[in-house]
Image: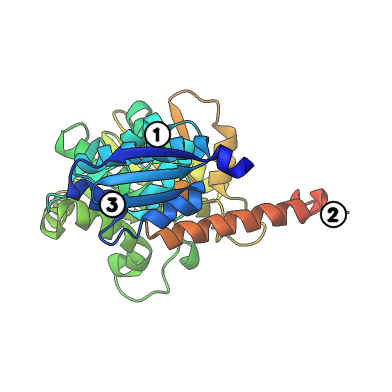
Amino acid sequence: MEQQERSHTERMTMETPEQFIGVFGIQEENIPIFNEELGVEIYAHGEEVTITGDPEKAALARETLDRLSEIVLRGEPVDRTRIRYAIELAAEGKADRIGEIMRDVIAITYRGRQVKCKTLGQKQYVDAIKGNTCTFAVGPAGTGKTYLAIAMAVVALKNKEIERIILTRPAVEAGEKLGFLPGDLAQKVDPYLRPLYDALHEMMGVDAYQRLLERGAVEVAPLAYMRGRTLNDAFIILDEAQNTTSEQMKMFLTRMGMGSKMVITGDVTQIDLPVGKKSGLVEALEVLKDVSDIGIVRLSHRDVVRHELVQAIVKAYEKHAQKTERRTPTFIRKGVNP
């Protein structure tokens, strides 16, 4: 009886079949997500939608559907990951911010594809780059840390805000020496810099990239080759920064020249340094947290924009790491001998 008294029904109408399909899927395959995540029952007949369940949850589902419908009407795709993210935002009382997803165009690739922020975390990241001379972005794989930074760099180059783009990352496995590998410098470092090449090629095309490379407007090099330089009028991106040592991070940060912007990205859960070596990224986040004109953005599994299974994997590992942290005695976590 109590369950029936608490039952409530919300009704809404989808304006077009395209809107209905955009939110619920061609075969209504997205409806179970709402049922599972919110504990409601959604029935769709034609363009009429009925939501039944706890009053608060039914109202939450209705508001989420309204916001997602607006996104579809803008011409943006709504996939399962975005639906789950929208539900999370609504549950946190941030339903009014769902519409910000995929709103602003950050850049346009050479193929004409629009690059947009897909989560509020990504929007915060892009805003931090715009508003600070130096920005740190920390988070798991798939959150768009490197890609969005490169997109911003390409736009800045096209707008003549800078004269060149410099991309670098530590070649940890080769000990930054690289001498034992066959071939010239480009061939030696290529395996470590390939993800940066791929992102540049996607943004500007291979031909344009080669032209900019030849005239020195784009440079991709291992971190060791930044030593001793002053980088003026450049957009400088340090990728995989968790694998820098303290000395390397300080060296990199002090390369900053006039008219330049720096972005440092990394995942502190994926440190590949030898045992006993402290990550320069971890140290920098602590040392520089109160320095003005330095932005620090922390992304999470919620900002993963790859396949929804990747988001689930990252979330599972985060939970496991938290459990391990709680079980580990304090003296071991701090590296103190009992």
- Expressed as whole percent of the image width and height from the top left, the position of residue 200 reads 24, 54
Which is more toward the observer, 11 or 197? Answer: 11
User: Disc 3 on helix, strand or loop?
Assistant: strand
Q: Residue furthest right?
A: 338
- Expressed as whole percent of the image width and height from the top left, the position of residue 303 reads 43, 47
Which is more toward the observer, 22 or 321? Answer: 22
Upstream in the sequence, badge 3 or badge 2? 3
Three-letter residue code for mark 1: Gln
Q: Name the residue carrying label 2.
A: 337
Q: Name the residue carrying label 1.
A: 124
Instruction: Choose mark 1 or mark 3, whichever is in front.
Output: 3
Where, by quadrant of the figure, is residue 25 drawn? bottom left
Three-letter residue code for mark 3: His
- Expressed as whole percent of the image width and height from the top left, the position of residue 254 reads 44, 36
Q: Residue furthest front?
A: 1
Q: Residue at x 32, y 63 (%)?
A: 194
Q: How far is the residue under mark 1 from the one under mark 3?
A: 39 Å
- Expressed as whole percent of the image width and height from the top left, the position of residue 144 reads 36, 49
Please say if the residues under marks 1 and 3 sit with CB atoms less than 8 Å apart.
no
Q: Residue at x 50, y 46 (%)?
A: 38
Q: Is residue 38 visible?
A: yes
User: Disc 2 on helix, strand or loop?
Assistant: loop
Q: Is residue 128 visible?
A: no
Three-letter residue code for mark 2: Asn
Could you tell whether 301 is left or right of 158 in the image? Answer: right
Labelled disc at residue 45? 3
Could you tell whether 235 is left or right of 315 in the image? Answer: left
